[in-house]
Image (cartoon, helix red, strand yellow):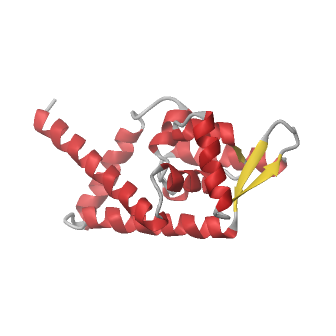
Amino acid sequence: MDLQLINLLGASAIAIADSIQNAAKEATGNSASFPAALVILERYPKITVDLLAQYLQLSQSGAARLVERLVNQDLVERHQGNDRRFVHLQLTSDGKAMVEKIQQAKIAAVSDLLQPLTTQEQQQLLSTLSKMAGEYSNTEVLEEYICRFCDIRQCPLAVCQERLAAWEKVNTVN
């Protein structure tokens, strides 16, 4: 392996992650888990607090406090599930608007980083990153954590589209 490539790829990954987190923080005025929770809730309507905690790598109590903040700001609503033991979370219209603001901030931040690349270089990078993405993890929970700011509808990976379709199928029936 080329050690210069490894070094530069690691630094680039950190720079990209920092740019996205800073953009999301500016868009919401809140720390990284706050905007990430909104993006995940948009992706998975009717998600439970427990699953949200797993996807954000938070403790159950940390996720419960985060959800309380989201509810208090009228961005999220709680709904009792068919099984009374579970509460499902859903974005309000203000929450959906905030997700759009987060996604636009992310697009602007990453676009700035891509600016030096030609269209052809951007397409090559897309191809390379798509190839590498299959190696990031092998568990759904870790994949969701990695992709916590992703707009899944724009993802070229089949596994992401399959997971979204399966979620929508299960949650449309209930």
Residue 95 as seen in the image, left or right of residue 4: right
Residue 30 position, x and y percent, is 47, 58
Of residues 119 and 93, the one nearer the viewer is 93
Instruction: Please tell me whether residue 33 is drawn above or below residue 42 in the rendered image.
Output: above
Residue 117 position, x and y percent, is 21, 63
Residue at 54 percent of width and 45 percent of height: 160
Residue 137, located in which quarter of the rendered image?
A: top left
Instruction: Please tell me whether residue 154 is drawn above or below residue 108 in the rendered image.
Output: above
Q: How many marks?
A: 0
Residue 75, located in which quarter of the rendered image?
A: bottom right
Residue 135 as seen in the image, left or right of residue 117: right
Q: Quadrant of the N terminus?
A: top left
Residue 77 position, x and y percent, is 73, 57
Of residues 9 and 33, the one nearer the viewer is 33
Residue 167 position, x and y percent, is 69, 45
Residue at 66 percent of width and 36 percent of height: 50
